[in-house]
Image (cartoon, rainbow, N blue to C red):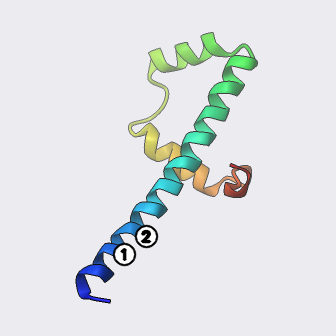
Amino acid sequence: MTNWQETAQAYQQEIDRLNESVKIEREAKNRAYSFILQSGLYSQWVEFCKLGLYGENPHKECAEYLSRSPYIDPKNI
């Protein structure tokens, strides 16, 4: 295998890893949205968004929380 093939393979592995992370996060957020809607919490969620109660970087906060959550199992997604 040539050096450029090894580099391409390494990039592909990183792309695959990132795609899996995105898939896990997307599924967790979709479940959260589903919970909000099914629980009748939409108006509270809208107020939460209007008031900006979600910190400076909600994506980072969500990803960090999900990475520590025992409830998110990639095997179930």
Q: What residue does disc 2 label?
A: 13
x 55%, y 41%: residue: 26
How many numbered circles are shown?
2
> Is the N terminus in the top left, top right, bottom left or bottom right quadrant?
bottom left
Residue situated in front as seen by the camera: 45 or 32: 32
- The answer to whether residue 66 is above or below residue 58 is below
Q: Residue furthest left?
A: 4
Q: Residue at coordinates 53% horizontally, 43% vertically from top-left?
A: 62
**Circles 1, 2 touching at the beta carbon (< 8 Å):** yes
Which amino acid lies under the numbered mark 1 shown in the image of this protein?
Gln
Give coordinates of residue 41: x percent, y percent.
68, 16
Q: Is residue 7 left or right of residue 75?
A: left
For the residue pair 3 and 70, the one nearer the viewer reads as: 3
Numbered tag placed on residue 9 in the rendering = 1
Q: On the picture, is 25 further left or further right than 9?
A: right
Q: Determine the residue positioned at 38% across, 67% down.
A: 12
Relative horizontal placement of residue 68, taking residue 49 as reference (left or right): right
Label 1 and label 2: CA atoms lie apart by 6 Å
Identity of the amino acid at label 2?
Gln
Q: Of all residues shown, which one is farthest toward the bottom?
A: 1
Quadrant hosting residue 14: bottom left
Farthest front residue? 1
Quarter of the figure with residue 40 = top right
Q: Residue 8: x and y, percent?
A: 30, 73
Q: Nearer the viewer, residue 29 or 14?
A: 14
Find residue 55 and report its image quarter: top left
Is the residue 75 above or below the residue 5 in the image?
Answer: above
Residue 42 marker: none
